[in-house]
Structures are given as C-alpha cells and as structure tokens.
Amino acid sequence: MALLLMIEDEPGLRLTLTDRLTAEGFTVESRADGLSGLAAARQAGYDLILLDVMLPGMDGFTICQTLREEGVDTPVLMLTARGQVDDRVAGLKIGADDYLPKPFHTPELLARIEALLRRAKKEPLAENLRIGDIEIDARAAVVRRDGQEVALSAKEYQLLRFLAQRRGEVVSRDILLKEVWGYNATPNTRTVDVHMTWLRQKMEKDPSAPVHLVTVRGMGYRFDG
Ligand code: CA
C-alpha cells in the first residue's frame, strides 16, 4: 500500500487525517514544520506528499519548488486554507500536482490521492480507444461517434482524450486545466466547464443526460462507458 508523507503544522488536522488515511490502508508519516518536512520529502520511497502551505520554518510553496528544482518528482497535493485562484495557480506552476483548499471533505481528499497515485504509475496510454459508441483514433486525431466522424476543436479533442484515457477515474478541473490547457490561457476552471458543455453537445446522444462525460459533483469529471 502507498506511503504518504504529510507536512502539516496543525496538530488536530494531522491526527485526524493520519487516522483516516491509515484506516483507508495508507501508511502515513508526518512532519509538523517546513524544514523537517523538506528533509523528509527529499528521501526516496514516498508515493505522495500532502503539503500544507502555511508552515513554520518554510512555506509549502518553497518546499515544493525546492523539491522540483532538485529533481524530486514525488506527486505533491497541496492543502491550504487560502483558496484564492492566485495561490492555486502559484502552487501548480511551481510543480504541485493538485491543490485542495481547506476545509475539504475527506472523500474528496481520498479521491484526489487515489487519482494522483494512479497517474504516477505512468501506465502507457492507448493509441486507440473504443468505448461504447465512441472511437478515438489518436494517431489520426479523429473521433467518431456511431461510426460518424465528429469535428472537434483541438481543446475539445484533448479534453476528450485525456478523460477517456482515464476511464472511470474522477479528474479535477485543476488537473484538466493543468494537463489540457497548461495555463497558457487565463486560468479559470469555468473554461473547463464551458468546453465540457460543447463536448457533450457533440459526443452525447442526450447532452442534458450524459452517459460518457459525467459530472462528479464538487470534484470534477469522469469518463464512463
Ligand atoms: Ca498550516
């Protein structure tokens, strides 16, 4: 089972999360300040780092940036009381893999941990996908529904392919923004929702009752089929 490193200075949260994550089968080690957290995070063997932003000694952004500069590529999920878009963007730009504002619900934290752990396995992605009535030919960048070619914009295609390759997995809007848009455009999770609406209109028989491109309330999107 996965080994998690939690860097969190709030004793109550550290205890609660450790108990809950241990109950889910994870092994959890924790550090309560930035410097000992960074020292631990440099060690090999952790599958994921849960990283608070406001920490004594060294803040979470600096820790994450330092790790990435040193070539440590352990997935980092940032946890923070600060929920501003600027902080989220800053966290993802310096190499965090996902960002979860406090307060959060434990099921959402668990889903994000599991999604990051699956991503980190770096499984080879299929070139061609056929899921129900949808066919994605990745070499030709062609999508068909019921055998008919569907004209998609580049972003719609990338969004569809990214989700379809992770069939059954909840993908957060933040991850979609990072992986599909790459923050070249103005980062805004609303962008993801708008493209999803367009994509459903093209790919779903009934866009108001999608069977493939499913909204997971409060968490993101999932490709079913
Ligand atoms: Ca803190």
Image (cartoon, rainbow, N blue to C red):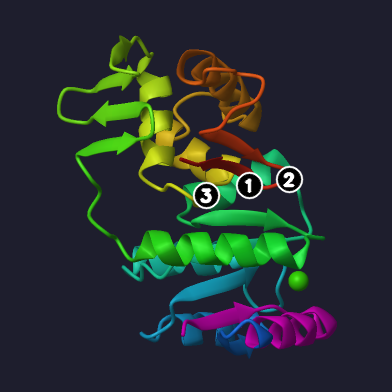
Q: Residue 220 carries which label?
A: none
Q: Is residue 13 magenta?
A: yes
Q: Name the residue under label 3.
A: 92
Residue 120 visible in the picture = yes
Q: Does the residue labelled 2 lie within 8 Å of ligand 1?
A: no
What amino acid is found at the position of numbered circle 2 in the picture? Gly
Ligand 1's quadrant is bottom right
Residue at left offset 29%, top offset 12% = 149
Point out the tag, 2 or 3, that comes first from the N-terminus.
3
Label 1 sits on a secondary structure element that is helix
14 vs 207: above or below: below
Q: Is residue 191 magenta?
A: no
The residue lying toward the viewer, choosing from 147 and 192, is 147
Q: Where is residue 118 in the image (x, y as percent from the top left)?
A: 42, 63
Q: Nearer the viewer, residue 195 or 12?
A: 195
| Residue occupied by mark 1 | 88
Where on the picture, by quarter, is residue 186? top right
CB atoms at circles 2 and 3 under 8 Å apart?
no
For the residues bearing labels 3 and 1, Cβ distance under 8 angstroms: yes
Q: How far apart are marks 3 and 1 (CA)?
A: 6 Å
**Circle 3: is it few (<14), some (14-19), or many (20+) Cα within 10 Å?**
many
In screen coordinates, is 26 left or right of 167? right
Which residue range is magenta in the image? 1-22
Instruction: Calculate the distance from the C-alpha at mark 2 to the C-alpha at mark 3.
Output: 19 Å
Percent across and percent down for residue 199 are: 50, 20
Front position among marks 2 and 1: 2
**Residue type marked 1:** Arg
Callout 3: SS: helix
Helix, strand or loop at label 2? It is loop
x, y (%) of residue 2? 47, 82
